[in-house]
Image (spheres, rainbow, N blue to C red):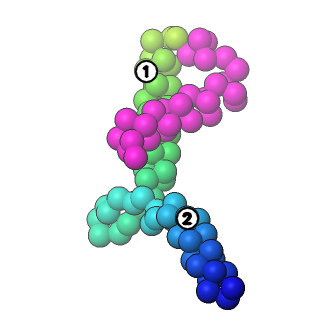
């Protein structure tokens, strides 16, 4: 009976621990950065570029209210970057 409990415990641990893997990271300048951090930075840079382009073309009134739209567009760019470049 004791062997069966050990076997069941081992099988359950194997099943539950198969999803564990190291966090995805990118090596930049000799240091490891998480993928999500890079994607967030790309999202912020993308939103800055969109803001500059729309400000110069007087099209910034399309993104009103700014306090809601800018974080949403930043998140959209970040998530699209994640999906396109890190499809795991």
Residue most extreme to the left: 29
Q: Residues within 10 Å of mark 2 (few under 14, many from 20)?
A: few
Residue 13 visible in rendering: no
Q: Secondary structure beneath disc 2?
A: helix
Q: Where is residue 13 shown, x and y percent of the image? A: 58, 72
Residue drawn at x 62%, y 86% as measured from the top left: 3
Does the magenta portion include 79? Answer: yes
Q: What stretch is highlighted in magenta?
A: 60-88
Pick the quarter of the image with the N terminus. Answer: bottom right
- Where 44 falls versus 20 (above or below)? above
Q: Where is residue 28 shown, x and y percent of the image? A: 31, 61
Residue drawn at x 61%, y 17% as measured from the top left: 63
Q: Secondary structure beneath disc 1?
A: helix
The residue that label 1 is drawn on is 53
Q: Where is residue 46 shown, x and y percent of the image? A: 44, 33
Residue drawn at x 35%, y 59% as measured from the top left: 26
State which quadrant residue 64 falls in.
Answer: top right
Q: Between residue 17 and residue 7, name the one nearer to us.
A: 7
Residue most extreme to the front: 1
Residue drawn at x 51%, y 60% as measured from the top left: 19
Residue 47 visible in rendering: yes
- Where 8 falls versus 34 (above or below)? below
State which quadrant residue 29 falls in.
Answer: bottom left
Picture mark count: 2
Q: Earlier in the sequence, mark 2 or mark 1?
A: 2
- Where 77 falls versus 42 (above or below)? above
Q: Are marks 2 and 1 in contact (CB under 8 Å)?
A: no
The residue that label 2 is drawn on is 15
Q: Main secondary structure of the magenta part?
A: helix
Marks 2 and 1 sit apart, C-alpha to C-alpha, by 51 Å
């Amino acid at each position: 009976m004791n062997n069966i409990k050990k076997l069941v415990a081992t099988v359950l641990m194997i099943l539950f621990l198969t999803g564990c893997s190291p966090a995805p990271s990118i090596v930049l300048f000799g240091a490891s950065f998480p993928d999500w951090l890079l994607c967030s930075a790309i999202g912020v840079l993308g939103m800055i570029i969109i803001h500059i382009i729309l400000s110069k073309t007087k099209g910034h009134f399309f993104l009103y209210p700014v306090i809601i739209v800018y974080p949403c567009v930043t998140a959209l760019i970040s998530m699209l970057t994640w999906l396109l470049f890190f499809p795991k």
